[in-house]
């Protein structure tokens, strides 16, 4: 469960963040959460508070809710479910079960919307509730169901510990265990945004780092909420040496914050010793090289060169240029 909150934020939330205005809709509560903080962990705490104060009560009384409030309730639960995949693993089941209850009530009334069914199916796949997801096949457009079929292949092994999806032959998803080095020195790179792509491009051009980053001690990781197979296909096309995985379950990666991309987590002896977040102003190839040296994957003598458009730079020439 990833709720690392500042004392200041905890004190601020001890006040009544959600005013006791019973005429206020849950959509207004969502706006309050978004206005309080940009930090996923902070927002997760507020969603948990909202669930305890209001959402759980409304879920127990769905038949009495007006239709418009049901649709709003579903959207708020969907937002909470998406956030919980990276910031509050303990609440994921509550939010997903709430989405199911709302979908069933809307179905009873005959007012379910196609987008709600699609969002619920996506949430089931992301949570790896494949049996429930397969029951949705007749309720959604066939093209929508096929979008997720690669995740739901039957007969796959169930792995203990860390596992993920990667691309196999023919560009199809393959579920496999993710093996980490026995000595505990490895790196996890969280990807999934255009800035992460930019970082990977720069690192692929650095002759000191590219070989390490493409080796068995580095895991390029997408969070389990990623359900678009084309994302990992595009990654393989752009960076064939940097083998990416979609995590089967984010909770199996303790110490890894999958909410921030790109981020680099450096382990030595199985212990997290350094984290780099972002790319550009404060994080670049030199910081990555320093961290590799810290965990013993790069020797000081290997750091003398740098990268310029993919070409190693002789350190003597660089020194001469500064004179």
Image: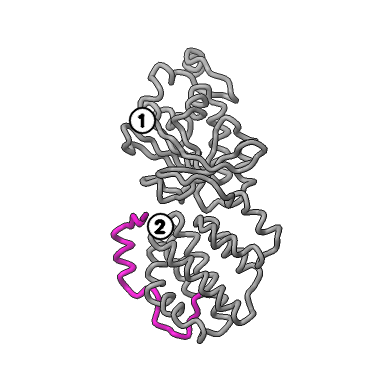
**Residue 63, percent across and down?**
52, 84
Give percent across and percent down for residue 280: 50, 39
Q: Which mark is residue 53?
A: none
Q: Which residue is mark 2?
A: 89
> Element under label 1?
loop
Determine the image quadrant of residue 308. top right
The residue that mark 1 highlights is 182
Under tag 2, what secondary structure? helix
Residue shown at the point (55%, 34%) measured from the top left: 243
Q: Nearer the viewer, mark 2 or mark 1?
A: 1
Dots 2 and 1: beta carbons under 8 Å?
no
Instruction: Give the quarter of the figure containing the N terminus.
Output: bottom left
Give the vertical position of 53 relative to 46 (above or below).
Answer: below
Between 77 and 306, the one lying in front of the other is 77
Does residue 212 appear in the picture of this structure? yes
Relative to the observer, which residue lies in front, 168 or 307? Answer: 168
Q: Residues within 10 Å of mark 2 (few under 14, many from 20)?
A: some
Q: How many marks?
A: 2
- Residues drawn in magenta: 1-26
Q: Position of residue 315 (x, y in %)?
A: 47, 16
222 on left or right of 239: left
Front residue of this view, candidates 234 and 205: 234
Cα distance between the residues tagged 2 and 1: 27 Å
**Mark 1 crowd level (few <14, some 14–19, many ≥20, 10 Å Cα):** few
């Amino acid at each position: 469960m990833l709720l690392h909150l500042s004392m200041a934020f905890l004190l601020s939330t001890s006040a009544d963040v959600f005013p006791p205005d019973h005429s206020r809709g849950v959509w207004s509560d969502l706006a309050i959460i978004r206005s309080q903080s940009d930090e996923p962990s902070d927002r997760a705490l507020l969603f948990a508070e909202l669930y305890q104060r209001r959402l759980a009560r409304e879920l127990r009384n769905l038949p009495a809710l007006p239709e418009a409030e049901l649709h709003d309730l579903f959207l708020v639960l969907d937002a909470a479910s998406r956030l919980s995949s990276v910031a509050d693993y303990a609440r994921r089941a509550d939010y997903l079960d709430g989405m199911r209850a709302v979908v069933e009530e809307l179905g009873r009334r005959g007012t379910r919307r196609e987008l709600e069914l699609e969002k619920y199916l996506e949430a089931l796949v992301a949570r790896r509730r494949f049996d429930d997801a397969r029951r949705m096949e007749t309720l959604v457009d066939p093209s929508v169901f096929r979008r997720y079929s690669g995740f739901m292949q039957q007969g796959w092994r169930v792995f203990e510990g860390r596992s993920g999806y990667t691309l196999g032959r023919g560009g199809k998803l393959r579920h496999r265990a993710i093996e980490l080095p026995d000595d505990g020195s490895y790196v996890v790179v969280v990807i999934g945004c255009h800035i992460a792509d930019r970082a990977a491009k720069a690192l692929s051009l650095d002759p000191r780092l590219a070989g390490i980053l493409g080796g068995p001690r580095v895991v390029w990781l997408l969070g389990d909420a990623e359900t678009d197979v084309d994302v990992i296909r595009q990654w393989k096309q752009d960076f064939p040496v940097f083998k990416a995985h979609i995590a089967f379950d984010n909770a199996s990666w303790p110490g890894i914050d999958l909410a921030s991309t790109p981020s680099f987590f450096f382990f030595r002896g199985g212990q997290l010793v350094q984290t780099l977040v972002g790319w550009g102003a404060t994080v670049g190839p030199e910081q990555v090289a320093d961290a590799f040296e810290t965990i013993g994957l790069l020797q000081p003598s290997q750091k003398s060169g740098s990268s310029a458009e993919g070409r190693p730079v002789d350190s003597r020439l660089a020194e001469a240029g500064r004179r």
